[in-house]
Image: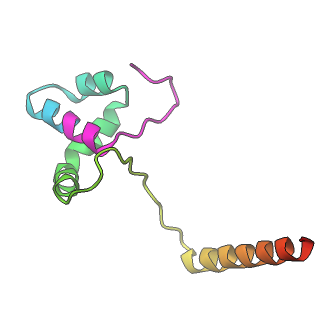
Amino acid sequence: MESPAGKRKALTLEQRVAALKKLDSGQSCRDVAKEMGCGKTQIARIKSKKEDVMKECESGARSDQKTVKRRKTQYEDLNNVVLEWFYLSFYLVFCVEK
């Protein structure tokens, strides 16, 4: 069940809750990581953010949904303007060609 080296494995909310239950029962991060097929650091991070995971679970979030960490950029406004320009120019070129 181990994933190949270098491949990331995003755990679903359901899997993260299962990992927390295993940690609560006394298993080590390394053992849980091996069972889940992910890294020890990922399990340790889930353990440190236990409250957030449980809040997400209690709020009724989809249990099969994987969460992806979105990083904020230094120039978020500029990125949004460039993305808007891209969509507009793509739309104009697409409309002109047809």
Residue bounds of the magenta highlight: 1-18
- What residue lies at 60% left-to-right and 76% top-to-bottom? 80
- Using the image, determine if residue 20 lies above or below residue 73: above
Reply yes or no: does residue 2 show up in magenta.
Answer: yes
Reply yes or no: does residue 15 show up in magenta.
Answer: yes
- What residue lies at 33% left-to-right and 44% top-to-bottom? 64
Nearer-the-camera pick, 91 or 16: 91
Q: Position of residue 22 (x, y in %)?
A: 15, 30
Q: On the rendered structure, is 4 left or right of 23? A: right
Q: Position of residue 49 (x, y in %)?
A: 22, 51
Q: Position of residue 48 (x, y in %)?
A: 21, 47
Q: Quadrant of the C terminus?
A: bottom right
Instruction: Provide the major secondary structure of the magenta segment.
Output: loop
Q: On the rendered structure, is 72 left or right of 17? A: right
Q: Position of residue 34 (x, y in %)?
A: 31, 22
- Using the image, determine if residue 12 lies above or below residue 70: above
- Using the image, determine if residue 75 lies above or below residue 2: below
Residue that extends furthest to the right in the rendered view of this protein: 97
Nearer-the-camera pick, 29 or 56: 56
On the image, which quarter does residue 77 sit in? Answer: bottom right
